[in-house]
Image (cartoon, grey):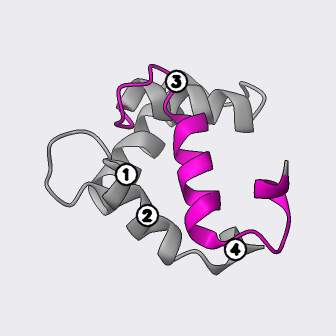
Amino acid sequence: MSVLSESAPRELKAKYAFKIFDFDQDEYLSKEDLKQTLRAITANELTDEEMVFVTDKLLEEADLDEDGFLSYTEFENVIARSPEFIK
């Protein structure tokens, strides 16, 4: 659980988070992985339409190669822009 401590390096936290969000363990975050993450984070309170909207917007912002998935590198780029993730 030391990966969750405030003193853990950002890179270690990012790798751990990516593995948690990669439900199908294919080393990419797909729309389905992102939807499962949203379901968990929001206690399944979003409608299907809201989940599609959020996942589409996330991919629009973060999917740099526009292949419909987030690679670890793309995920890390998102994390780098989120200083609160380091905490």
Residue drawn 49% across the image and 75% down it: 80
Asked which secondary structure carries label 1, the reply is: helix
User: Disc 4 designates what residue?
Assistant: 86
Mark-to-mark CA distance, 1 and 2: 6 Å
User: Disc 3 designates what residue?
Assistant: 23
Q: Position of residue 70 (x, y in %)?
A: 32, 46
Q: Which residues are magenta?
A: 2-30
User: Disc 1 designates what residue?
Assistant: 72
Q: Is residue 68 above or below residue 7?
A: above
Q: Determine crowd level at label 1: few under 14, some 14-19, many 20+ residues with C-alpha closer than 10 A.
A: some
Q: Determine crowd level at label 3: few under 14, some 14-19, many 20+ residues with C-alpha closer than 10 A.
A: some
Residue drawn 34% across the image and 37% down it: 28
Mark-to-mark CA distance, 4 and 1: 17 Å
Specify which label sits upstream in the sequence, 2 or 3.
3
Work out whether residue 77 or residue 49 is closer to the camera in this orientation and state it: 77
The answer to whether residue 64 is left or right of residue 75 is left
The answer to whether residue 45 is left or right of residue 10 is right
Specify which label sits upstream in the sequence, 3 or 4.
3
Work out whether residue 71 or residue 47 is closer to the camera in this orientation and state it: 71
Q: Are marks 1 and 2 in contact (CB under 8 Å)?
A: yes
